[in-house]
Every structure is written in structure tokens, then in C-alpha cells.
Amino acid sequence: PMSDSYSGDPNTNEGDRKEGGFRHDTTLTPGKIFVGGLSSETTEQDMKDYFGAYGNMTDVVVMKDKITGNGRGFGFVTFADAKVADRVVAARHEIRGRSVECKSAVPRSQDEVG
């Protein structure tokens, strides 16, 4: 059977990838980390206050429920320096009394590079 997904149809793939939420695209953002386990009250300001102690950040996002506006319990922080991000991922963190989990947000395929 023909597999359509590999036909490289310009109408489906290309356009989508270039625009549409590229700010959250993790492909080549070495300093980006995923932060999970947040309480629903945690704001981007909380994240800035907390992670700002580690180093300079270029982006902070808390994912919110579109309908309720409550935090969905996770977000992303991007540090200017990837070494800082590595240190943050290696440490334990608590925000608003809840222990949160930090993981590198860089996709697996890039792990070998560097």
C-alpha cells in the first residue's frame, strides 16, 4: 500500500511546521526545560521568580486550560545558557510548596549531538 505520509505533499506538511506555535517548538532550543507537577495556581511570574535565581531566561510559559484558564500543571522555561538548564534539570525543585519535575525539553534525537 502507498503510504501517504511520506509523499512530501507541500500542502500538508511544510506550511504547518514553519508557522503556528513556533515559539513552543523545541527542536533547536538547547536551554529549554519542561517543568511538570505545578499546582494549578502556579503562574509564569512564580516560575520567573523561582528559576530566575539560576540564570538568565529567554522564555517562560505555563500551559493553561483554554476554558477555565487554570494552569494545566506543566510549563516550559528556556534559559539563555544550556549549561544552566542542565544544572536545573539535575536539581530538585519546589514551587509553591509542591515538588516539581524538570526535564530537558530537547527532543531525544538531538541528545547525541554535542
Image (tube, rainbow, N blue to C red):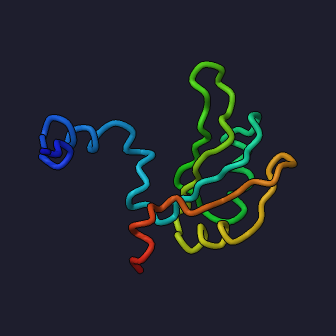
Q: Position of residue 46 (x, y in %)?
A: 74, 45
Residue 111, above or below 17: below
Dividing the picture into quadrants, the one containing residue 2 is top left
Residue 29, above or below 20: below
Q: Where is residue 114 in the image (x, y as percent from the top left)?
A: 41, 80
Residue drawn 64% across the image and 44% down it = 74
Q: Position of residue 70 (x, y in %)?
A: 69, 28
Quadrant, the N terminus: top left
Dividing the picture into quadrants, the one containing residue 29 is bottom left
Residue drawn 69% across the image and 42% down it = 45
Q: In this view, does 62 lie to the left or right of 106?
A: right
Q: Is residue 28 left or right of residue 74?
A: left
Count of number-bearing discs: 0
Residue drawn 45% across the image and 72% down it = 111
Residue drawn 12% across the image and 46% down it = 7
- Residue lying furthest front: 1
Q: Position of residue 56 (x, y in %)?
A: 60, 62
Dividing the picture into quadrants, the one containing residue 91 is bottom right
Residue 63, above or below 67: below
In this orientation, which residue lies closer to the viewer: 4 or 42?
4
